[in-house]
Image (cartoon, rainbow, N blue to C red):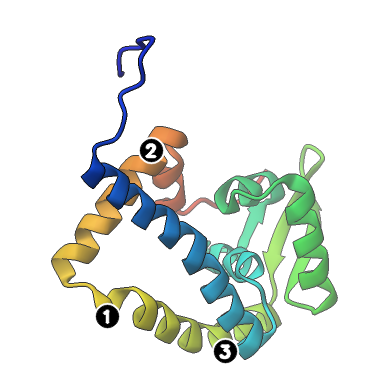
Amino acid sequence: MAEQTSEPRWLTDEQLRQWKSLMALMMALPPALDAQLKRDCGLNSFEYHVLARLSDQPAGKLRMSELSAYTQGSPSRLSHAVARLERAGWIERRNAEARCVNAHLTEAGRRKLVEAAPAHVREVRRLVIDLLTPEQFDALGEAARLVVGQIEPGWMDAMERNSAGDC
């Protein structure tokens, strides 16, 4: 851990340049991906990632609390998104043991994700992956995992694990 002093460790000119680039990426990429999803399939990025996370699960279900953690959405935001996805017939909420609620991906939801994925992957490739060498992309992914691990320890491990989603 960095030592706390009264004088901040200011960024060098090069660090500031790189930091500004990172901030620009974090500000520009999400709206660009969101616009593509809205235009091509009527989903926003958050809704797409809710469907994608559920599709990653063997039974296509997760506890709402787990889904909230995986998507980094507040319970309220997740509840609103799931309600919209329910109205569309893409998700069902079902009560489970211990007063727990599971979100279940429906067959219609799986079809919607399959329909949305090709255009989304094309946009991800166009905006990020195809611009970088494999080494640059690997370094970007590794750097992202380190930063996320500093902010939310264990979150990346949880994202990469498949859980049953049972209460």
Q: Report the amino acid beneath label 2.
A: Gly
> What SS does tag 2 mark?
helix
Q: Report the amino acid beneath label 3.
A: Glu
> What SS does tag 1 mark?
helix
Which quadrant: the C terminus? top right
Residue 148: x and y in percent read: 41, 43
Q: Is residue 161 above or below residue 82?
A: above
Residue at x 45% of width, y 51% of height: 159
**First reached walking from the N terminus: tag 1 or tag 3:** 3
Question: Which quadrant of the structure image shows residue 59?
Answer: bottom right
Gap in angstroms between the C-alphas marked 1 and 3 = 22 Å
> What SS does tag 3 mark?
helix
**First reached walking from the N terminus: tag 2 or tag 1:** 1
Q: Which residue is mark 1?
A: 130
Point out the frontmost of discs 1 and 3.
1
Question: Which one is in front, 6 or 85?
Answer: 6
Point out the frontmost of discs 3 and 2.
2
Which quadrant: the N terminus? top left
User: Residue 149, which numbered label?
Assistant: 2
153 relative position to 30: left or right: left
Point out the frontmost of discs 2 and 1.
1
